[in-house]
Image: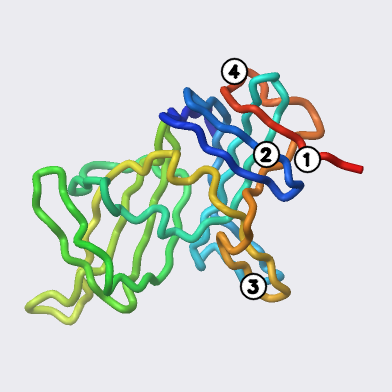
């Protein structure tokens, strides 16, 4: 958990589950970020399944506190365009680790800052994401399966470091919560609720205007 900032170049308009309208930006959005592995044992979602839980507490322009809390599929962490990666080097101060199998057969090559590429097309790609929260991004070390070694039966892996901008994680649709499953981004609203106790201590109000739904 740490203080975080997101710069919104334009205005985003979203609805929450109560039908309240949020006009977000432009400008700098301040808040408190917390990320964890999402677990729902009742619906078979374990830490090993690899969902990411994102919690971002913020205040609107009038100082009212809100919380965006979402469960996301880890594709949001994949180093797709325009992210560029670096070969993993040194110790990585991870806070959480997510592991899962991803189908990367149709993904574009992972691109390095020096212009080289890593082709990574496998139906069952054993991927590990190690995460550390930063002020404007998630620092990520991803370890991905790249195939068998030429002279060995042991699997071969590559590890890369990069940053995922926080705006990639925010204002996404809520998951559908079924009896026996959780399906990220299946709803038609964004999971933001008003804080009922206290406020986001020390968080500067952000350029966010909330227009409550008319209630009978």
Residue 68 occupies quadrant:
top right
**x and y percentages locating residue 78 in the rendered image:** 34, 56
**x and y percentages locating residue 205 in the rendered image:** 61, 19
Q: CA distance from mark 1 to mark 4?
A: 25 Å
Mark 1 surroundings within 10 Å by alpha-carbon count, few (fewer than 14), some (14 through 19), many (20 or more):
few
6 up-or-down from 92: above or below: above
* Residue underneath mark 4: 204
Q: CA distance from mark 3 to mark 1?
A: 30 Å
Looking at the image, tell me whether mark 3 or mark 4 is earlier in sequence order: 3
Query: Which label was assigned to residue 21?
Result: 2
Given contact means CB atoms under 8 Å apart, are the residues at marks 2 and 1 in contact? yes
55 up-or-down from 148: above or below: above
| Nearest to the observer: residue 67 or residue 148 | 67
Secondary structure under tag 2 reads strand
* Residue underneath mark 1: 213
Given contact means CB atoms under 8 Å apart, are the residues at marks 2 and 3 in contact? no
Q: CA distance from mark 3 to mark 4?
A: 37 Å
**x and y percentages locating residue 167 in the rendered image:** 44, 39
Given contact means CB atoms under 8 Å apart, are the residues at marks 3 and 4 in contact? no
Mark 3 surroundings within 10 Å by alpha-carbon count, few (fewer than 14), some (14 through 19), many (20 or more):
some
Name the front one of labels 2 and 4. 2
Is 73 left, or right, of 195 in this rendering? left
Looking at the image, tell me whether mark 1 or mark 4 is earlier in sequence order: 4
Query: Which label was assigned to residue 181?
Result: 3
Looking at the image, tell me whether mark 3 or mark 1 is earlier in sequence order: 3
Q: CA distance from mark 2 to mark 4?
A: 21 Å
């Amino acid at each position: 958990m740490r203080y975080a900032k997101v710069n919104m170049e334009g205005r985003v308009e979203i609805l929450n589950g109560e039908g309240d309208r949020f006009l977000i930006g432009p400008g700098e959005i301040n808040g408190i970020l917390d990320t964890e592995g999402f677990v729902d044992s009742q619906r078979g979602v374990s830490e090993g399944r690899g969902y990411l839980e994102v919690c971002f507490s913020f205040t609107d322009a009038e100082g009212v506190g809100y919380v965006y809390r979402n469960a996301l599929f880890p594709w949001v962490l994949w180093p797709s365009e325009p992210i560029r990666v670096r070969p993993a080097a040194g110790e990585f101060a991870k806070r959480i680790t997510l592991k899962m199998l991803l189908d990367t057969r149709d993904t574009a090559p992972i691109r390095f800052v020096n212009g080289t590429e890593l082709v990574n097309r496998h139906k069952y790609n054993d991927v590990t994401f190690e995460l550390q929260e930063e002020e404007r991004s998630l620092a990520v070390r991803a370890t991905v399966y790249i195939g068998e070694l030429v002279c060995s039966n042991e699997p071969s892996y590559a590890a890369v470091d990069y940053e995922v901008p926080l705006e990639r994680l925010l204002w996404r649709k809520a998951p559908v919560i079924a009896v026996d499953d959780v399906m990220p981004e299946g709803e038609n609203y964004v999971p933001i609720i008003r804080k009922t106790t206290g406020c986001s201590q020390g968080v500067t109000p952000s350029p966010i205007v909330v227009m409550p739904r008319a209630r009978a």
